[in-house]
Image (cartoon, grey):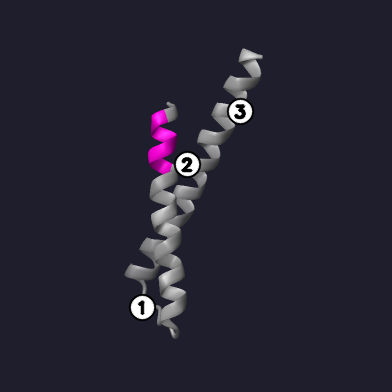
Amino acid sequence: MLILLLRFQVTLVSACSAYFSYATFNYHLLHHLPIHIPDWREASKIVAILRQASKWQAACQKLT
């Protein structure tokens, strides 16, 4: 049972880290490349994803 819990925790931390890395990469891509966002609703979705990613990262750091 303990081994299963540890495996789940490692998988969860890996998933959180991957998600945060993906969101961070997209954030930097949008801010450092001359990309035009035609619709501000799309920009607000990106901001929401980044906020969620930072919450996930904080939760993952508490697990480790």
User: Taken as a whole, is the magenta stretch helix, strand or loop?
Assistant: helix
Secondary structure type for disc 2? helix
In the picture shown, does residue 47 fall above or below 20? below
User: Mark 3 sits on what residue?
Assistant: 8
In the picture shown, does residue 54 fall above or below 34? above
Pick the quarter of the image with the C terminus.
top left
Q: Position of residue 50 (x, y in %)?
A: 41, 58
Give the residue type at disc 3: Phe
Q: Residue at x 61, y 14 (%)?
A: 2
Mark 3 surroundings: few (<14), some (14-19) or many (≥20) residues within 10 A = few
Q: Is residue 64 visible?
A: yes
Q: Nearer the viewer, residue 14 or 59?
A: 59
Q: Position of residue 6 (x, y in %)?
A: 57, 20
Q: Nearer the viewer, residue 4 or 30?
A: 4
In the picture shown, does residue 42 fall above or below 14? below
Camera-nearest label, 1 or 2: 2
Task: Name the side, left or right, on which 63 lies relative to 6.
Answer: left
Secondary structure type for disc 3? helix
User: Mark 1 sits on what residue?
Assistant: 34
How many numbered discs? 3
State the image quarter where residue 41 is shown: bottom left
The circle drawn on residue 17 is 2
Task: Name the side, left or right, on which 15 lies relative to 62.
Answer: right
Provide the residue span drawn in magenta: 57-62
Q: Is residue 58 magenta?
A: yes
In the picture shown, does residue 59 fall above or below 9? below
Pick the quarter of the image with the N terminus.
top right
